Image (tube, rainbow, N blue to C red):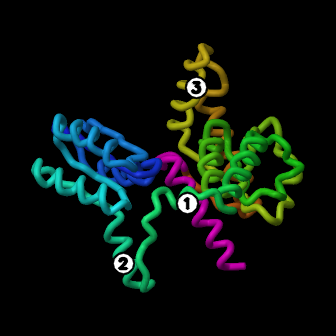
Amino acid sequence: MTRLHLHLLSDSTGETLENIAKAALAQYDDVETVRHFWPMVRTEAHLERILQEIAQNPGLVVFTLVNPSTRRILESRCAALGLPAVAPLDPVNDALSAMLGQQAKARPGRQHVLDAAYFARVDAIQWTIAHDDGIAWEEWEEADIVLAGVSRSSKTPTSIYLANRGYKTANIPIVVESPPPAALYSLRNPLVVGLTTSADRLIQIRRNRLLSLNQMPDTAYVEEEAVLKEIAFARRLFADNGWPVIDVTRRSIEETAAAVVSLVNQRKAES
């Protein structure tokens, strides 16, 4: 097991850095990563305190600092310590500058400006939360996406993730004994997407859910024959209505959401 100190410095929230680090580290096995997260680094005094920590715990330094002065200090001090300091956005900014014929604005956190897109995301999140698990189906026509699937097929977390991307997303559980509202079959604006999964995986998730609630995991909710019947019923419903289907068995929430967005974009391109 390799131990790595990873220092992430940002002059904004650091969300971009965290995502980059997460994506890169996923490519390596047997690495014990000690993350040192330093957001909102905007003064030399703050940076000096961080550099003392870096010297005590040497490792890889990854940063997104737009202020030239703090960047120079960080890079020179890391070089003196013999540590790599990487600015992952530099190649992208260099390419954009060349293509656009202008220099990037050195404004920390500019991507977090409270613009119209930001408020649209907030609105999408609020709308999605208010339309979880089949609630307020009368308003589904306002949605961008409606997710349908049996219980515990990751509908809610996928909906919330999509809402963070700006999509108003409703979701509806498919239950054999309780058919969904008729409005589901006549929707025009939202894209209806069916989520399905393997019976084994679904039973495992449901058992864990029951145990977390201190309930006995010996109900029809986790009985194999009943679960197979549920999944088959949902698949027939999806097929009968021509809805696209995504198998979430081996997908993360992020991967499922990306597949949904791809379907939305495909639909827009064909319209």
Question: Residue 209's mark?
Answer: 3
Q: Is residue 10 magenta?
A: no
Q: Tag 3, which secondary structure?
A: helix
Look at the image and tell me in which quarter the N terminus lies. Answer: top left
- Amino acid carrying label 3: it is Arg
Query: In which image quadrant can residue 168 be found?
Result: bottom right
The range drawn in magenta is 248-271
Nearer the N terminus, badge 2 or badge 1?
A: 2
- Asked if 147 appears above or below 37 in the picture, the reply is below
Residue 174 in view in this figure = no
Give the label, 2 or 1, closer to the camera. Answer: 2
Nearer the N terminus, badge 2 or badge 3?
A: 2
Q: Position of residue 116 (x, y in %)?
A: 69, 62
- Asked if 13 appears above or below 230 in the picture, the reply is below
Look at the image and tell me in which quarter the C terminus lies. Answer: bottom right
Between 251 and 21, which is closer to the camera in this rendering?
21
Answer yes or no: do the residues labelled 2 and 3 have beta carbons within 8 Å?
Answer: no
- Asked if 158 appears above or below 266 in the picture, the reply is above
Q: Main secondary structure of the magenta part?
A: helix
Query: In which image quadrant can residue 202 be found?
Result: top right
**Residue at (82%, 53%) from the top-left corner?**
140
Residue marked by disc 1: 259
